[in-house]
Image (tube, rainbow, N blue to C red):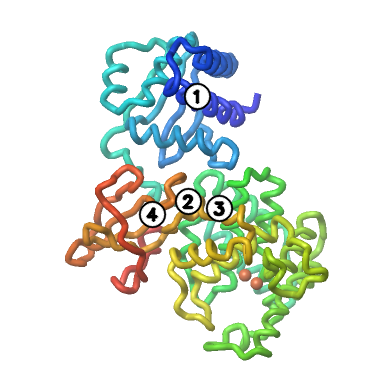
Amino acid sequence: MNLYRSGKDLINQFYALVKSTQIYDFKNDVVLAAADKFVTHLDKILINAPQVEFLRYRDYIFFNKLRMRFEIEGYASLQFLSESFKILKLKSISFLPGITPDEAIRFAALFREDHDLMLKSMTAGDFRSVAVQFAGPDEEIPDFLQDGEQTKRTYFKALMVTKNLIQNLWTGQPVNVKSFRRVVYTLIDSISQDEYGVMALTTIKNFDEYTFNHSLNVGILTLAMGQRLGFDKKNLVKLGTAGLLHDIGKVEINKDLLYKPGKLTAPEWDRLKLHSLYSVRQILKTRGLDEISISALVSAYQHHWNYNGTGYPAQVPSEILPSFLSRIIRICDAYDAMTTPRPYHPIPYIPTLAVRVVWERQGSFFDPILVKIFLQLFGLYPVGSCLELSSGEVAVVLKENPGHIDRPIIKIVRNRDQEPVDGARIDLSVNADVNIDRAVYPQKYRINPAVYLT
Ligand SMILES: [Fe+2]
Ligand SMILES: [Fe+2]
């Protein structure tokens, strides 16, 4: 039995059970059927496992220590469970062998109540085969950034390998595709463990090395999208490799042009636009051409094609839609480019504005379905955004809240008098007293958001 799949199914069934108890009487057939289904599946899992445990840690839900990922399928159920953990202040729920449908129904019904009632019912000993642990006051927002060392190491290792690859191509030296592919694998592992931790690192923008940084960031962002879309490992490798290599053809562009400050002339733009064709040539040059490099080659060629047929290089015939991977890369590439300082636009967009541009161009530049996935992942205030709050304080966004695109987890960094403070972390999906007034340029308060994220 696939444990991850079992966990996903169990969450779906529990969600269906809770919903049924909210609509019907406990004795209703719909409720009884939902309870039966849940208990039968639970029993099946319990044949091989001593218990079934759901644990909330770092805003993720773990099922028997496996992290449950937010994917299109089962999104609502997982979001419900994660929200309920917060509202009921739960740390974990364990189901033990011997649970009856009646017990399952009574427990599920507690999910329409509040923390106090749940606490009362659990301490009164109403349940024999269900145990819960409540979260302590300090566990509300665990400090994932402090133990993100491994994630950070992966990011900088990946940056180094990407840099070597690009530099070798630049100077015409042979490229070791194997070490490059290994990077993609480690990134996939990191993202499946902690996608927000890895995504936070993409907000580090290093002006001098923007080609390396940008390539890696697009690789990471596309992988995070692929994971949301439920891609399997094989397709994630294809997608991540394509994301990392999309701009590789820039090694053939003269550096004076690539780093030219100020506006480019029309002929200069035309020369720069050739980079998608050059990317194809560079990928063809790498040894051991296989399925993965072929799809990278297609995406490199198409990554400036728009959903509505505009873009470059010109399409013939124009009604051909770019490949699915290319459409994913198109969005992530545009977003990272907009939020990164470039020689020709030294002041980048703030993330909130970049998200809005992506949103407004759905259906024209970008695939509208993918834009929705993008928005769920990045939120309206992406990680690293600097926010002015209704309280007069200033905060930095630490993390998105799946399901609450407008209420992220933030950290206060300036008090009401705009003095620097090591302020509280606030989960805006739980705390309704604080509101966001607007996102601003961090420079306004001399804030470097990366400091709080790394
Ligand atoms: Fe490009
Ligand atoms: Fe790009």
Residue 259 in the figure: left or right of residue 102 = right
Contact flag, marks 4 and 1 (Cβ < 8 Å)? no
Q: CA distance from mark 1 to mark 2?
A: 26 Å
Crowd tier of the residue under label 4, counting other residues whose Cα lies within 10 Å: few below 14, some 14–19, many 20 or above: many
Amino acid type of the residue that numbered disc 3 sits on in the rendered structure: Lys
The part of the image, by quadrant, that contains residue 454 is bottom left
| Quadrant in which the N terminus is drawn | top right
Dot placed on the residue nearer the N-terminal end, 3 or 2? 2
Q: Amino acid at mark 1?
A: Phe
Front: mark 1 or 2: 1
Say whether disc 4 or disc 1 marks the residue closer to the N-terminus.
1
Nearest to viewer (mark 3 / mark 2): 3
Kindly report the distance in space between the C-alpha atoms of the residues bearing marks 3 and 2.
Answer: 18 Å
Name the residue carrying label 2: 196
For the question of whether residue 48 can be seen, the reply is: no
Compare marks 1 and 3 and give the one earlier in the sequence: 1
Quadrant assignment for ligand 2: bottom right
Residue hosting label 3: 372
Front position among marks 4 and 3: 3
Which of discs 1 and 3 lies nearer the camera? The answer is 3
Q: Secondary structure at mark 1?
A: helix
User: Looking at the rendered structure, which numbered label has been put on residue 398?
Assistant: 4
Give the total of numbered labels.
4
